[in-house]
Amino acid sequence: MRRLQVSLCMALPISFAMTPLARPEFKLTKDLLSAKEPAQFQLNEAQIAQCHAPLMPGMEMYLTPLGASALGGQWGSWQLTESPDAPSTAAWRLNFMSSEWRAMHITSEGNLSAIARPVELDELKEQHSFVPEDAAFGMEHWTFVEDLLAPAVAMKYDGMNYSMGKAPDTFPVTYTASPQLKDAAIPAPSWQYWAITDCKKKLVAVVALEETDGMHPGRCKIYNNKGQKATEAVPDALIPRLQFVDINQHLLATAEAPALGSDIPMPQLPRRGSLGNMLPYTIRFERGGYYMSSDLLKKDFRWILSAAVQLRSLQDATQGFTPLLVKDKYLLLSVVLALGLIFLVIFGTMLVSSLRTMSRIFFHRDKSLPNYQTPLP
């Protein structure tokens, strides 16, 4: 069990330190007595019998994009090692021919496990009676997140232009420095919600992603199907690194692109068009099983953390993007008509060839055979 600690001092270089908590023996300490019940996840009958959850056997998984094309969509896999040929425990795909092209279909062993698609809050409330707790209640338990986000705020202010001024009627003379008012106002984040449903369209979890320009790290929150916040990911100020913490400030998982410890600023990471400009991520899960540990650390639910990171990478890569066949309906119609015409030509050619063969078999007449009978004397 680890606790995420952040130190901030006068907007100087910021350090993230993850120090393991020493537990030589179990004692009811003050921290344990004040621990809060994390959000719970439960398997329904469909998830147990039919919608098998993707396997997360390793403590580290590699979320690897594998390809993208106008007709084939976009696809990738969750692998055990960083090699492109490594065995995978799950795969995902987008269909660029569909109007719901952003819906991510997650499969395991060739069978559909879950679907993640972008939704509005009103739709979640109407279809699943879902209301996120931080939109109505429960915010007081997550105020510590604002402290963890302080380095990103400090980095934003550090890049602003400051104007110097002298405070009036002060002795000794006091000078102040402040950014322009229009720059200093940090707007409230806007969120894109993603509903994760099983193969029977039953709500499993909801992921909320901060909307960014795709070139800077964004926040991420995960809720259970009742609207309780299970974890929030604290992004780094520059590096595409997410650290998921629960309501008790315990570290659940760390994800970074392209690999843990790369420490490459997000704008400097190369992106490949053949992979849909998606960044590969590596995610490391912490060990659970301790008192008041999150259900997201259990083997049946760790895949939800991987899905959230994959959606973060997907949303960053598709900012301002719309598939050509979805954007241009006439082009899609032309492609469909062309494919239909090609099919008719091939089918017609095969039909004519088959009719000719049948005519030779049933209607061909051989010449009369010569009469070899010997005339009677």
Image: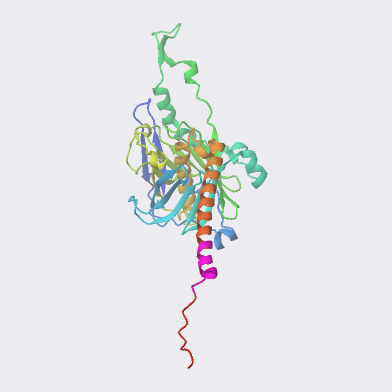
Between 186 and 23, the one nearer to me in the picture: 186
Between 200 and 321, the one nearer to me in the picture: 321
Magenta-span inclusion, residue 364? yes
User: Colour mode?
Assistant: rainbow
Between 369 and 223, the one nearer to me in the picture: 369
**Residue 311 visible (yes or no):** yes
Q: Does residue 329 sit above or below 368 in this rendering?
A: above
All told, the count of numbered labels is: 0
Measured as percent of width and height from the top left, residue 279 is found at: 39, 41
Measured as percent of width and height from the top left, residue 50 is found at: 55, 61
The quadrant where residue 281 appears:
top left
Measured as percent of width and height from the top left, residue 124 is found at: 63, 43
Q: Residue furthest right?
A: 126
Overall secondary structure of the magenta stretch? Answer: helix
Magenta-span inclusion, residue 340? no
Measured as percent of width and height from the top left, residue 205 is found at: 55, 48
**Residue 293 visible (yes or no):** no
Between 26 and 346, the one nearer to me in the picture: 346
Q: Decide if residue 58 is on the left or right side of residue 332.
A: left
Q: Residue furthest top?
A: 169
Which residue shows up at 41% across the image and 57% down it? 57
Which residue shows up at 49% across the image and 16% down it? 181
Q: Decide if residue 137 is on the left or right side of residue 157.
A: right
The quadrant where residue 87 appears:
bottom left
Magenta-colored span = 355-367
Q: Residue furthest front?
A: 377
The quadrant where residue 25 appears:
bottom left
